[in-house]
Image (cartoon, rainbow, N blue to C red):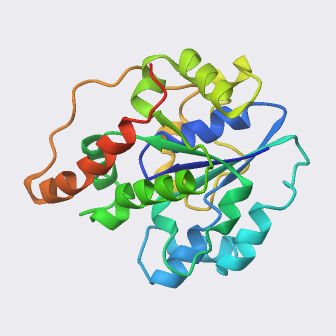
Amino acid sequence: MKIAMWSGPRNLSTAMMYSFGARADCAVIDEPFYAAYLAMTGLEHPMRSEILQSQSRDPLVVAKSVVGPNPAARPFWYQKHMTQHMIPGVPRDWMKNMRNVFLIRHPARVIASYAAKRENPTLDDIGFWQQAELFDEVAAWGGDPVVIDSHDIRENPEKMLEKLCDAIGLPWSPYMLSWPRGGHPDDGAWAPHWYGSVWNSTGFAGPEGALPEVPAELEPVLDASLPHYEKMKQAKIPL
């Protein structure tokens, strides 16, 4: 089974990759379309040159690789994908070979976290409208998309991960609740900039507090993101 986990940035996505990667029966891959996305858009992201050197920049090559056998020859392959990477010119037909899961988080939390690492995120940067679009596409072809909220995972990791495994037909494993401190061998080249807090963790962080304040200049991004988040929230696995 190939599991495509779709989220925007700053959304518990790396911790989820570590969680699945802690299973002996599961291989993982970290944002395989990132270099292609940067090459196609010309965007300046932290560690851009390292990213471009670390992966194929051809989206067709990447798409072919993610539907092939996983490098570790394990029964399950967890693929961490970013919704904002699926720009025009990046194929999507390969998604029909995946069990597609959508990881959501309140946009106020995403914006506050992202802005601390890269200034002035735009609506396109944080992936909410793209996530809703991909969800609709998967649903339209009968792909039975699954939605899970990162807030709920942090509230009760064991309960929500068990529910997620049940929803996608994966046997539950308690090994998903913890991982070794210090990173994962399959981290992307960009990990030194973005993954510091996860590198220092051995499991999921505790419940989230109140929503953070969003700077006034980013309120339009929040307002534009909220309808997409609320729409996806209606389909989530309940806590």
105 on left or right of 74: left
Vertical arrangement, residue 58 with respect to residue 209, above or below:
below
Seen as rendered, the residue at the extreme right is 73
Compare residues 137 and 175 and report the one nearer the observer: 137
In x, y percent, where is residue 142? 61, 50
Q: How many marks?
A: 0
Q: Identify the residue at image location x=23%, y=63%.
A: 120
Quadrant that contains the N terminus: top right
52 on left or right of 126: right
Compare residues 69 and 95 and report the one nearer the observer: 95
Q: Identify the residue at image location x=47%, y=55%.
A: 136
- Quarter assignment of residue 17: top right
In x, y percent, where is residue 25? 84, 34
Residue 106 appears in the picture as rendered: yes
In x, y percent, where is residue 48? 51, 74
231 on left or right of 43: left
Compare residues 155 and 232 and report the one nearer the observer: 232
- Quarter assignment of residue 18: top right
Q: Identify the residue at image location x=51%, y=47%.
A: 195
Compare residues 182 and 53 and report the one nearer the observer: 53
Vertical arrangement, residue 88 with respect to residue 210, above or below:
below
Vertical arrangement, residue 63 with respect to residue 239, above or below:
below
Vertical arrangement, residue 165 with respect to residue 81, above or below:
above
- Quarter assignment of residue 166: top right
Seen as rendered, the residue at the extreme left is 216
Quadrant that contains the C terminus: top left
Residue 199 appears in the picture as rendered: no
Q: Identify the residue at image location x=29%, y=45%.
A: 107
In x, y percent, where is residue 61? 74, 77
